[in-house]
Image: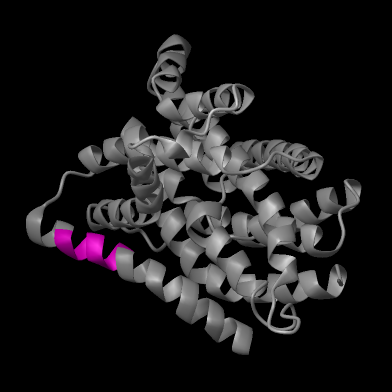
């Protein structure tokens, strides 16, 4: 019960407070959500990826978690395809369902949640948090994978229904985020300290601004969303994301023989709700934005309960 209220008070309520701010301001001033989404994808997301990648040492453990994440992503893609086929969904809805299942809210909820867990009992030893660094390494690998695929594959699926394949690829190539990884690898290879240049703080400001910007934008989009509480597709997507998703992740964690803190982190990272980016991508590409926004909203609400059980299960299945 203590963990539940910690999650609720330190993660869920602050998130909804920012969403509510965006919602209220949009109702009052009719804010343009497309302008906000462009700021997010062309400034905040690439800066977030670039800074995090530049400041992280790439290890063999990260690569292994990255590969595991790819397998989980493929499994969720196939699952989304199957659900869409059973539901006889059209192309736009099929791709929206797949995006809602494949992409996790690691940036907004995952990072703060993992930090909270491994800086609380029973992971504090003599006032220190030795397990936190172990947990952050696999989390960054998953965060990297999710951001790279959401801003490439996610855009491809969202644009595929309305654009030709060539146009979808061109749209992906216009996204600055996909150039973050090669840029970082080049800069690391030439061994140049980028943090010493005068504009580095500007990159950090943009990185730190992603979470509030994404949540405010989601609030603005929700203010323009026509809610349908009887939308079966939304219910299925949320159930799949919060219940089936962690079960799939558990299978691949066992396959890759992860244990202890790493296994707990990978499981928790795949139990978080649908990524806010999936709703923003839907808005940017005009691909079922109402469905995508509701999937993000309801999965975030119910994750307050499901994440609590996942955290307990992770501690029992993968003891330290």
Question: Which residue is situated farthest in the bottom direction here?
Answer: 1
Q: What segment is highlighted magenta in the picture?
A: 19-25
Which SS type dominates the magenta stretch? Answer: helix
- For the view shown, which residue lies furthest in the left direction? 29
In the displayed structure image, the side of residue 140 where residue 91 appears, left or right: left
Identify which residue, 27 or 80, lies in the foreground: 27
Residue 157: x %, y % from top left? 50, 29
In this rendering, does residue 314 appear at all?
yes
The residue lying at 48 percent from left, 76 percent from top is 10
Question: Is 165 drawn above or below residue 83 in the view shown?
Answer: above
Quadrant of the drawing holding the C terminus: bottom right
How many numbered marks does the figure carry?
0
On whether residue 176 falls in the magenta region, the answer is no
Q: Quadrant of residue 226?
A: bottom left
Q: Is residue 155 above or below residue 143?
A: above
Of 313 and 177, nearer the camera is 177
């Amino acid at each position: 019960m203590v963990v539940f209220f910690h999650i609720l008070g330190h993660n869920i309520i602050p998130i909804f407070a920012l969403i509510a701010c965006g919602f209220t301001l949009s109702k009052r001033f009719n804010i343009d959500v497309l302008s906000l989404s462009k700021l997010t994808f062309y400034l905040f997301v690439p800066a977030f990826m670039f800074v995090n990648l530049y400041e992280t040492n790439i290890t063999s453990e990260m690569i292994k978690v990255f590969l595991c994440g790819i397998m989980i992503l493929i499994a969720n893609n196939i699952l989304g395809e199957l659900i869409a086929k059973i539901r006889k969904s059209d192309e736009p809805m099929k791709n929206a369902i797949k995006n809602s299942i494949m992409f996790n809210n690691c940036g907004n909820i995952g990072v703060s949640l993992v930090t909270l867990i491994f800086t609380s009992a029973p992971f504090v030893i003599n006032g220190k948090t030795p397990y936190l660094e172990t947990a952050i390494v696999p989390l960054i690998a998953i965060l990297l994978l999710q951001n790279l695929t959401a801003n490439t594959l996610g855009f491809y699926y969202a644009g595929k229904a309305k654009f030709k394949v060539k146009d979808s690829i061109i749209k992906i190539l216009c996204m600055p985020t996909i150039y973050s990884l090669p840029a970082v690898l080049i800069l690391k290879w030439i061994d140049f300290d980028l943090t010493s240049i005068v504009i580095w703080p500007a990159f950090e400001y943009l990185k730190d601004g992603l979470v509030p910007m994404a949540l405010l934008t989601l609030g603005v989009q929700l203010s323009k969303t026509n809610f349908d509480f009887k939308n079966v597709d939304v219910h299925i997507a949320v159930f799949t994301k919060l219940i089936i998703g962690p079960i799939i992740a558990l299978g691949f964690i066992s396959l890759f023989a992860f244990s202890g803190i790493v296994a707990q982190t990978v499981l928790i990272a795949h139990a978080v709700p649908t990524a806010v980016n999936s709703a923003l991508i839907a808005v940017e590409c005009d691909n079922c934005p109402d469905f995508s926004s509701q999937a993000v909203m309801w999965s975030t609400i119910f994750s307050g309960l499901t994440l609590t059980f996942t955290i307990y299960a992770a501690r029992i299945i993968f003891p330290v």
